[in-house]
Amino acid sequence: MLKTVVSETAKRLVVILFVVTGAFLLVRAAPGDPAAFMAGEAGSGDPAFIAHLRAQMGLDRPLPVQLGYYLRDLAALDLGQSYREGRPVFDMIAERLPNTLALAGAAFLLALVMGTAAGFLAAIHRGRLIDRLISIGSVLFFSSPYYWVALMAILLFSGKLGWFPSHGTQTIGAGYTGMRALADYLHHLVLPATASALFSMAIYARLVRASMIETANALFVKAAHARGMAPVWIWLRHVLRTSLLPITTMAGVQAGQLVAGTILTETVFAWPGIGRLMYEALGARDYNVVIGVFLVTSMIVILSNLVVDLLYRFVDPRTRAA
Amino acid sequence: MPIWKSLLSRPDAILALILLGAVVLAGVLAPLIFPGGPWRMVARPFIAPFTDMGHPLGTDALGRDLAVALIYGARTSLEIGLVSTCAAVLFGTAIGGIAGFFGGRVDSLLMRSTEMFQTVPSFALAILLVAIYSPSLLSIMAAIAVVSWPPVARLARAEFLSMRRREFVQAALLSGQSNLRVAWSQILPNVLSPLIVMAALMISMAILFESALSFVGLGDPQVVSWGYLISAGRGVMARSWWLTFLPGFSIMLTIVSISILGDAIGDSQDPHFERKETE
Amino acid sequence: MMTDPILDVRDLCVDLRGGSRIVEDISLSVTPGQTVCLVGESGSGKSMIANAIMDLLPGSLLAVSRGQIRFHGADLRLCGHRALRELRGRRISMIFQDPMSALNPVRRIRTQFDEVFSAHGVEPEGGREARMLELLELAHLPTPRRILDAFPFELSGGQRQRVMISMAMALNPDLLIADEPTTALDVTTQAQILQLIAELQRAFGTGVLFITHDFGVVAEIADRVVVLRHGKIVEQGPLDEILRAPRAAYTRTLIDAVPAWNPRAGGLSTPALVSARALGKVFKGGATALDEVSMDLLAGETLGIVGESGSGKSTLAKCLIGLEEPDHGGIVMDGTDITALPAAQKRLRRHRMQMVFQDPTAALNPRHMIGRTLADVLKVNGCARPDLRARALALLDDVRLDRRLIDRFPHELSGGQRQRVCIARALAANPEVLIADEALSALDVSVQKQMLALFQDLKEARDLAILFITHDLRVAAEICDHVVVMRHGGVVARGTPEAVLAAGRHPYVEELLAAIPGQDWFPAGGAAAARGAGRCAI
């Protein structure tokens, strides 16, 4: 087991190195002077900042040496300076990251639980009304841009009905503390988390349904019937359990997509996380921030993949032995 | 063609076909029907839909016709969807096909690199690519193709690998047919239908990607796209909700149609050749 | 026997939903302690009858449309799902052909075994754990505690089937339905499983409904035989009667399809065409596939390679033909070692050896018509374009197929026809050597007989050397000039069939021979044959 953990982790380190090198090369290959490009808005106006960038990037040295500097900085958690705010990018990301993790985590759980439940219901009621409704619902959510669903949700649930706040993480000026503050935060979280979750939820529902229907045709399910087990137990203990394995792999991919997807939901809901940060930086062409957020997002995705992979090995006895 | 027959036997597929046909037709003919383009101010701003038959879907904050913008948006979406999907499918099939056919070291090398691309969050990578190479139709298509080929490669590899082990392929190789010939005439026709189904899915994803990129301000400033319309309408959403609603609704209808057709094609390809024994 | 039947099926019909009748007017009964064999080829509906009795038919496709299924006098069709569920597993058990997929791959044997008890709320004396261990021990599983902790993939095929049988017998059922339970197993394992079922049957007094396609197995275990064809009963009666004096011509064909036992003297002494020299191969996991295997295939002979699964016989064939690379050793053809040749040279020689595979369905491209399949091979072997169709038709004649099949797809053909197409395709390359890798085992017994005859004819007409890979010692003894017996990747015996199977034979050959079922009726070497010879009037 330890051996797998080590080798899997090593594999991820290679991927991280690949991502970082890729980002580095992309910037160097950008059209024009990389320093001017990185300075973005400031490119024409602030020669001091460009000079600072030039020195930091070591543009007069050969490319491998530049990469060396870059990696050294990253290892020291130095993601450079934001031109717009004049602060270290790492600090800006660090202070917003908890909000993003809360949003993505909530969306992930919601999608996993609701999606699996919907897929399970659809599978056991295959061909009946519930199945049709769930199928239609999942096709619709799968087909809609979720930032647009988010906007529509704001129109309906904040605008028309006034049930949920439409932006931010807390009621401004209310000065809540303790449990009240937490409740307020969660209240603000409802719409963004649901909107982010819908797409993944639709994917899980379809996958769980298809996987369960396939498993239900397996011989061991027939054998369980022949043993006289009650159908409910067969669905739960044999079909669902076995079908959840492919879902685990999917969950790894989706967790990553959710983190990246917060760029859209955070923008819509003015949720102060790293996605919103990236959006603002894009508008201001503050590229150090954009790349910083990209790298951090990638790290999170790679880590969650690692966790899911190890989990899968633990859950599926066949891979555990191999 | 049996595909057409099975499509026409499903009412949802017929509806999807009509809808998609309309979108494609409108997109293709846009410059002929509205030679003035989508950017022209043609009437007073904020006309509500269905109130002025000269501008059936109303106008935006600058008095531009929303119907015209939607039709030009369809053109952009389809163009980007088709081109980037084609590029991704061709590249992915080539990589995956080679890996699956030859196996061994070639396979593990190609698949390791594919996996790396797949681990990077695709939307974030697409944003980075478009941002660095400045938004244009070309950079957007390229970015979408770059982030969407890995799943194709994995599918193609799995299919080629399983076909490679099939005995009819081994028999073809034993009879002296060359590798290329076997891959082309024995394997490819047998793996085409899952690839087609996947391509349909990828066109949808490409359209969603493009709209999302436009929404965060990384659309091609020269062309109108549905995502751009959503973000443009967002500021006045409280006042004229349809400016946000209609472009998103167009995306949804298009993609629902594509998914239905993809499913229908996938279903129609299966039964004949894999006759299941009833015993 | 005049005891009341446990199971009494009357006029059972199964229909495709909204369609044709698949199983028609089946009547049969099973009394305590009796073994009733349901025999038939593929498509005879034999498994469907078993599933109908258990109410396990896929409801969306098939339904029982008429008839009664009486269990101790009560009609199961009328008793409702809940009551039926109570019976299943407790009083009627079932075991399946494929013990791997009949066990949930991701759950331990213990959990799955335990369900037998929990599903029926049974608490055996001394606790479930003790009872499970006891049952596994009864099934001759050496380390029952380890088996309970294992996942299905950690067990061998034979062990899995033993586990299935223990589970089926756990609640001491009155009736055991066995759906081809030994078809996926090797002969020696099959013999052990058949013995186990008989043992438990005696101990528990269970009635057994045994479904099989193999008349050898029937002769070994049946008290009563029901012969099925196309969903109808051809005839039924006590074993003696059916084997001694079958009334239906079809039954006769099935019985005759069991190869006769007359090991050939063989002994051709033509020069060697292909020779393997000390071939060795180790699989990735570390298992030895080939262990210093040497053999000669003589010009114009049929060489039988006999062995059970995992013996390395297929790997040997694949190495000879170039589908696998041996780790070391050489393959000599015309005095040159072809393993050492560059890839281009290898390709040029490919046509000299051709292969016929086990499963003809998998061996034909589903999207190519028969004509195209043959033409593709003819083309690369230098046939001019205008002659392609004529040559393809001639090939169909050679394998005795209707010329009209040239414009058909494989799925429109029967299994036997498909295998003939595969042979025609192999011949299209004009080979000197034909390798048949278990080429008969996916076919029905009545078809096997015809295919053997075809191989013999082709061999003589085309002066072919045939490498015949099989698990069936009977077949090898009948048609081969020489036989090589393999085990665990090595050769244990070689020579003419007569010599290999003669007195003083290798203990493993002895074991294989002893495992052949139904020797009382279908003699196969040794003491058993002598004992049965008197009884065997056919």
Image (cartoon, coloured by chain):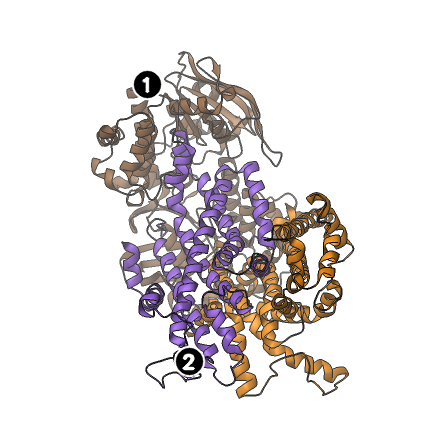
Chain colours: A orange, B purple, C brown
| Residue B64 shows in the view | yes
Chain for mark 1? Answer: C
Q: Hey, what amino acid is under mark 1?
A: Asp
Q: Hey, what amino acid is under mark 2?
A: Thr
Q: Say whether residue A64 is left or right of residue B209.
A: right
Compared to residue C402, the image places residue B153 above or below, namely below
What is the CA distance from the residue labelled 2 to the residue labelled 1?
A: 86 Å
Chain for mark 2? Answer: B
Tell me if mark 1 has few (under 14), some (14-19) or many (20+) residues whose alpha carbon lies within 10 angstroms of its own. some
Image spot of residue C448 (x, y percent): 34, 34
Helix, strand or loop status at disc 1 = loop
Q: Determine which residue is flagged by label 1.
A: C463
Residue at the image point whose x is 36% and y is 17% from the top: C300
Q: Determine which residue is flagged by label 2.
A: B59
Compared to residue C417, the image places residue B59 above or below, namely below
Compared to residue B59, the image places residue B8 above or below, namely above
Place residue A88 in its image quadrant.
bottom right
Q: Nearer the viewer, residue A38 or C328?
A: A38
